[in-house]
Image (cartoon, rainbow, N blue to C red):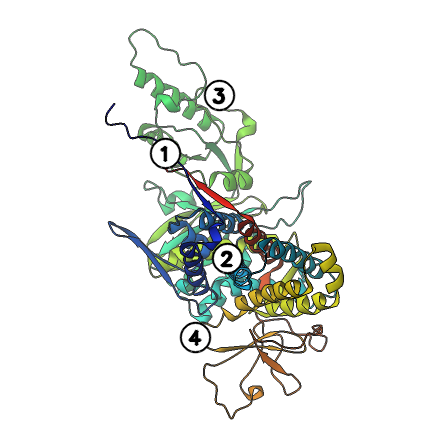
Amino acid sequence: MSRLSQKQPSICTAVPLTDPDVSQKLALLRQVLTSCFGPWGRLKQVHNNVGGAIMTTSTSSVLLKAIQVSHPLLKLLVASILNHTSRFGDGGLFAGILSLCLLENALRLGVDQAVAVGVYNRLLGLCDAYLVRDDCGCKIRVDFSSTQTLLTLAHGLLASKPACALTPAEVKHVALQVTRAFLLTVPCGTRGRDRLGAAVVVPVEGQPPWASAALGGLLVDMPESLHPADLELQGSTLIRLALFSVSLAGDLPEAGDGPLELHGETCLEEAVLEQLLRLADQLVSDGVQLLACQKVVHPVLQHYLRVRGVIVVERLGLAIMEPLVQMTDAQPLATFQAPVPGVSYGQLGGLSLHQCGSRAMLHLLPAGEPATCTLVLCHRNQTALAELKVSCERAGQVLRLMLKEPFALLGGGCTETHLAAFVRHESSSDVTEAVRELGCSRHDYMRVVGAFCHSLESVARALGQDGGVTLTDLCHAHCWGIPAAPPADVPWVELVRSCGCGLMSGHSGLEWNLIGTEYPSFSPALNLGTESLPCVLDSFFAKANALHVAVESANLILDLKYVIQDRN
């Protein structure tokens, strides 16, 4: 009993945001996220001091999972960002930077935190109402009759991840394959159901990114006992498939439900193997040409089937089971102790050999046009390949969201500066009503509005990682960048080339202002004089939700009065 430690009382911290240590940690996290933002973001290397793998990334979902945060406020914010990225695929850095800027700006003002929360909520509603309007100046409709918008979205997501280590030409090629993989998952006909297919990512190390490709069907590891000549024997007819989710290695814990009869002094292992061989006889008599198993297949069963012309593919893994079921219409069998129903079999259109460098893979071809495909991603080293895999999976997730909301937002910081100008203009026209609803002074309201707009502009300014100057024009409120330390005698009109999204080019008819400095309130004009598409786009669905996550997380933290930590 003397070794038992006494239970420690919980620690209660009042008004945690006034703690200098908490403020320092929030500022450090903001600096880390800001330095990762955009195509010129800085990479982060995460490792521990006792060895293990070293990870290099600038992706929020990867970085925030790898680092350990100790304070409950940081844990709350990190959990919100990770939940957003898991659902929407993009906008994690945007949400994190904006939320931390909102917190820091609200604390810097010195206004009552309840007032800041109320104003932030009101301005969030103002942004929501503007983004769904038909005349929203930072939103474009996606035309599904052309792939240009889809390619632009995929290209922007890949180009913003420097850890992918891709040249501009390689970015275009991989973006094209990601877009093609997405289109392959969209069914050509509903067949009585509306369901997107699956895209399985297969990473291949040691090959250049130019070898990446999107293929219809599925790729699995080539069985060692299978030779190319065996595939030629299958012919061009449909292939009957039996799919098992249970192990066929003969292990009793994996035997599933069903009786197992033993006679006399029969060995238990022999009885299980005899049951497997009876299953093999039924598969051969039913005309099965391919047995696919999620787990392991007994070597004797493999040999027994192979000499009878049945191809055996084992160790598929759980990730590929659902796409295989969707492609073949097979029903996964969870036991080998009962006869296989005829309706459980699936069909393949054929088999072929696919060579990825030195890696040989078996290509399962679909029968008909089911929406299932494989995205083969190649890169020269493991670090870049891991980042490329995550980025392409996120890009595919964003493209799928386009089917829910067929809109996209201007990228390159233009949406942030445009929203900031709109909020600043609209807020100045309804101050009396807002002050009455919120019960605050006019002075405090306008200061919090300014903090909200400066926070949005801070996200746009974070895109310039090399000390460049960030501007906004006083007509359309787009974001513009010029090199660091511009010559004093050269006017800005001669330095700017195009805005961040690429929709507008610099000309003498525009007037610019430094981001972060005060400028007269104005209503951003629509881009009616151009028919070209932006060069950089963001997902509407992902960014709109990221805006909610940022504001709501900041408000939740501002509302916290006590943090109680259990030390036991």
In the rendered structure, which disc, 4 or 1, sits on the residue that comes first in sequence? 1
Kindly report the distance in space between the C-alpha atoms of the residues bearing marks 4 and 2: 21 Å
Q: Residues within 10 Å of mark 2 (few under 14, many from 20)?
A: many
Q: Name the residue under label 1.
A: 306
Q: Position of residue 143 (x, y in %)?
A: 68, 62
Q: Nearest to the eye among marks 4 and 3: give it.
A: 4
Kindly report the distance in space between the C-alpha atoms of the residues bearing marks 4 and 1: 62 Å
**Residue 354 appears in view:** yes
Q: Nearest to the eye among marks 1 and 2: give it.
A: 2
Q: Nearest to the eye among marks 4 and 2: give it.
A: 2
Q: Nearest to the eye among marks 4 and 1: give it.
A: 4
Circle 3 sits in a helix, a strand or a loop, which is it?
loop
The answer to whether marks 3 and 2 mark residues whose Cβ atoms lie closer than 8 Å is no
Q: Residues within 10 Å of mark 3 (few under 14, many from 20)?
A: few
Camera-side residue of 240 and 14: 14
Three-letter amino acid code at the position of disc 3: Pro
When asked about the image quadrant of residue 526, the answer is: bottom right
Q: Mark 4 points at which residue?
A: 466
Using the image, determine if residue 35 lies above or below residue 339.
Answer: below
Kindly report the distance in space between the C-alpha atoms of the residues bearing marks 4 and 3: 67 Å
Q: Name the residue under label 2.
A: 96
Residue farthest along the bottom direction in this orientation: 489
Three-letter amino acid code at the position of disc 4: Asp
Using the image, determine if residue 117 lies above or below residue 262.
Answer: below
Circle 1 sits in a helix, a strand or a loop, which is it?
helix
The answer to whether marks 4 and 3 mark residues whose Cβ atoms lie closer than 8 Å is no
Three-letter amino acid code at the position of disc 2: Gly
Q: Which residue is drawn at 48% across and 38% down?
A: 321
Which disc number belongs to residue 339? 3
In the rendered structure, which disc, 4 or 3, sits on the residue that comes first in sequence? 3
Q: Residues within 10 Å of mark 1 (few under 14, many from 20)?
A: some
Circle 4 sits in a helix, a strand or a loop, which is it?
loop
